[in-house]
Image (cartoon, rainbow, N blue to C red):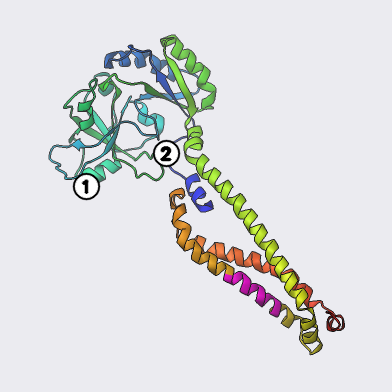
C-alpha cells in the first residue's frame, strides 16, 4: 500500500496542474442553446477573463479536464476499416485550451481562432489515437467521424472532422483505466450542454474566484459559476484521497498488529527463559559460555518468528489478490514488497527475542541450580 501510494503521488496527468483553475459555467434554461449564442457568450467572457491580473490564459471546453468528456463508442475513418469498436473520447474546446493545460504539440498544428470562430470541422488528436488507429501512417489530413454525434439532436450529423494536429496524451483520474484515444474539436460545433472554464495564472488560482464571478456577472448575471477549484485540489480529491485513506487505515492496523505480535513474542520468550532457568544454570555450570546461551535462546525465537513469517508468506499469496483492485502502479506480487516485508518482520521479531535471550546469559549458575 505504501509503494502504491508513492506511485499515485507521482501520477503524471500529462499536463501542468499548477496554477490552473477549473469551474463549470451553468447557463439558464432555454438560453445559449445554439452554437452561435455559445460563441457570442465566450467571445465576451474569455477576453475579459484573460485580462484579469496574473492570468496568462483562459479557455472553454465541453468536458472536464482529467475527468473525461463525451465518448463515442465507435468512429469512422475513411480508408481505415476495423472489426472491433474504436471507443474514443472527444472534447469541444477553444483555441487557448492547449496552452492553458500545457498540452504539447507533437505534429501538425493546433486549433486556430479562425477554426473556432468559423466552427470548422477540424480536430486535434492525441498520441494514443494515432497509435491505435493509424499505426505507422500519418494521421494529418485524414477525416474522422464520431458516430455518437448522429444520436444527439443538437449536434451535426454525418460530420467528418479533418485531423490537423497531434498532442500528447491527457490521462484520466480513473487510474486503473488505460488512456483512451482522444480528439479535440472546436467548441462552436454545437451549443448543447454547460461548459468548463479553465484559467491559467501565475498567482494563486483560488484568489481569482471572486473576480471570475464578477466577470461572469458582467457578461450575463443569469449564468452561474459552479464548483471553482484548482486542478491540484481536484487531484487531491479524486486521485490522492482514497489511496491516502487506505494507506493510513492499513498502517494503523498493521502497526497495532505488529505491536501485539512483538508483545506476545516477548512474553513467550520471557516465560520460556523462566522455565529454562534451571537448565541454563546447569549448562553454564558445566562450562557453557554466554554466547552459547544467547544462541540457544535466540534459535528458539528464530524458529518462532521464521515459522510465523513462512505461514504469513503462504497466506499472503492466497489472499493478496483481494487487494489487487486497491493497488496502482505496483503488482500484488511485487518482489520488493515480498522481500522487504518478511525481512522487516524477522528483524523486529529478533529484537523482541533479544532482551529475554540477553537476560538468560546473565543468570547466576548457583542461583539457577537452586531454582525450582
Q: How many C-alpha atoms fall within 10 Å of the one at disc 1: few (<14), some, or many (≥20)?
A: few
Q: Residue 244 at x, y = what percent?
A: 54, 44
Q: Residue 305 at x, y = what percent?
A: 62, 69
**The quadrant where residue 358 appears:** bottom right
Which residue is rendered at x = 62% and y = 57% of the image? Answer: 257
Inspect the magenta stretch and tell me whether residue 274 lies in it: no
**The quadrant where residue 85 appears:** top left
Residue at image mark 2: 173
Viewer-side residue, 216 vs 286: 286
In the image, taking residue 166 as reference, residue 308 lies left or right, namely: right
Give above or below for 357 relative to 212. Answer: below
Residue 198 - label = none
In the image, taking residue 355 as reference, residue 308 lies left or right, namely: left
- The answer to whether residue 132 is visible is yes
Residue sitting farthest toward the left? 79
Inspect the magenta stretch and tell me whether residue 305 lies in it: yes
Mark 2 vs mark 1: give the one in front: 2
Residue extent of the magenta highlight: 296-307
In primary-sequence order, the first of circles 2 and 1 is 1
Amino acid at each position: 500500500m505504501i509503494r502504491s501510494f508513492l506511485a499515485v503521488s507521482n501520477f503524471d496527468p500529462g499536463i501542468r496542474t499548477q496554477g490552473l483553475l477549473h469551474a463549470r459555467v451553468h447557463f439558464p434554461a432555454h438560453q445559449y442553446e445554439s452554437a452561435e449564442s455559445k460563441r457570442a457568450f465566450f467571445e465576451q467572457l474569455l477576453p475579459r477573463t484573460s485580462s484579469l491580473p496574473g492570468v496568462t490564459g483562459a479557455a472553454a471546453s465541453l468536458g472536464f479536464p482529467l475527468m473525461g468528456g463525451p465518448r463515442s463508442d465507435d468512429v469512422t475513418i475513411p480508408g481505415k476499416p476495423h472489426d472491433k469498436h474504436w471507443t474514443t473520447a472527444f472534447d469541444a474546446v477553444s483555441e487557448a485550451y492547449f496552452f492553458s493545460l500545457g498540452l504539447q504539440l507533437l505534429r501538425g498544428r493546433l486549433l486556430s481562432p479562425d477554426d473556432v470562430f468559423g466552427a470548422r470541422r477540424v480536430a486535434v488528436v492525441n498520441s494514443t489515437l494515432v497509435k491505435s488507429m493509424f499505426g505507422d501512417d500519418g494521421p494529418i489530413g485524414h477525416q474522422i467521424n464520431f458516430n455518437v454525434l448522429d444520436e444527439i439532436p443538437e449536434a451535426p450529423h454525418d460530420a467528418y472532422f479533418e485531423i490537423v494536429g497531434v498532442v500528447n496524451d491527457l490521462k484520466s483520474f480513473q487510474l486503473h483505466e488505460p488512456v483512451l484515444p482522444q480528439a479535440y474539436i472546436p467548441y462552436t460545433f454545437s451549443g448543447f450542454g454547460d461548459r468548463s472554464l479553465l484559467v491559467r495564472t501565475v498567482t494563486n488560482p483560488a484568489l481569482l474566484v471572486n473576480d471570475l464571478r464578477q466577470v461572469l456577472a458582467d457578461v450575463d448575471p443569469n449564468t452561474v459559476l459552479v464548483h471553482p477549484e484548482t486542478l491540484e485540489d481536484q487531484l487531491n480529491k479524486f486521485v490522492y484521497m482514497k489511496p491516502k485513506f487506505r494507506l493510513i487505515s492499513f498502517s494503523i492496523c498493521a502497526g497495532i498488529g505488529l505491536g501485539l505480535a512483538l508483545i506476545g513474542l516477548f512474553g513467550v520468550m520471557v516465560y520460556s527463559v523462566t522455565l529454562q532457568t534451571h537448565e541454563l544454570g546447569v549448562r553454564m555450570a558445566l562450562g557453557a559460555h554466554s554466547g552459547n546461551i544467547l544462541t540457544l535462546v535466540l534459535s528458539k525465537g528464530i524458529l518462532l518468528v521464521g515459522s510465523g513469517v513462512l505461514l504469513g508468506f503462504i497466506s499472503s499469496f492466497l489472499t493478496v489478490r483481494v487487494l489487487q483492485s486497491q493497488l496502482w502502479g505496483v503488482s500484488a506480487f511485487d518482489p520488493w514488497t515480498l522481500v522487504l516485508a518478511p525481512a522487516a518482520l524477522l528483524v523486529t521479531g529478533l529484537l523482541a527475542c533479544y532482551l529475554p535471550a540477553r537476560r538468560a546469559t546473565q543468570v547466576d549458575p548457583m542461583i539457577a541450580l537452586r531454582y525450582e
